[in-house]
Image (cartoon, rainbow, N blue to C red):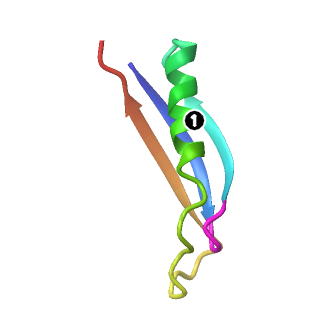
Amino acid sequence: LYTDVYFRIQKDGSMTHLEVKHRCGIRALDMNALRAVQDSSPFPPLPREYEDEYLVVNLRFEHSQ
């Protein structure tokens, strides 16, 4: 079982476009994965040398039974 979460980190460290891309089928586990990402925001600003507008992050939360 796993939940995939997608989001973007903007240059200032703020998070946008948060969404669950793959649900494990157990709502509580999917919500916990989403909440874990939400609770870690805001992130530190991206380095000045980082040339793109944002950093794409895909996280997989593997749930053990």
Give the image quarter of residue 28: top right
Tell me which amino acid carries mark 1.
Arg
Examine the residues drawn in magenta and state their main secondary structure.
loop
- Quarter of the image with the C terminus in it: top left
- Camera-side residue of 18 and 22: 18
Asked if 6 appears above or below 33 in the picture, the reply is below
Label 1 neighbour load within 10 Å: few <14, some 14-19, many 20+:
few
Q: Residue at x 53, y 50 (%)?
A: 40
The location of residue 23, given as percent across then percent down, is 54, 22
Asked if 20 appears above or below 37 in the picture, the reply is above
The location of residue 20, given as percent across then percent down, is 60, 33
Asked if 53 appears above or below 14 in the picture, the reply is below
The location of residue 5, given as percent across then percent down, is 53, 38
Residue 12 in magenta stretch: yes
Residue 45 in magenta stretch: no
Q: Residue at x 58, y 25 (%)?
A: 31
The location of residue 41, given as percent across then percent down, is 59, 54
Whether residue 23 is visible to the viewer of this picture, yes or no, is: no
- Camera-side residue of 10 and 43: 43
Residue found at the very far front of the displayed protein = 39
- Camera-side residue of 58 and 41: 41
Q: Which residue is mark 1?
A: 35
Report the magenta residues as a range. Answer: 10-14
Instruction: Report the number of numbered marks.
Output: 1
Q: Residue at x 55, y 87 (%)?
A: 48
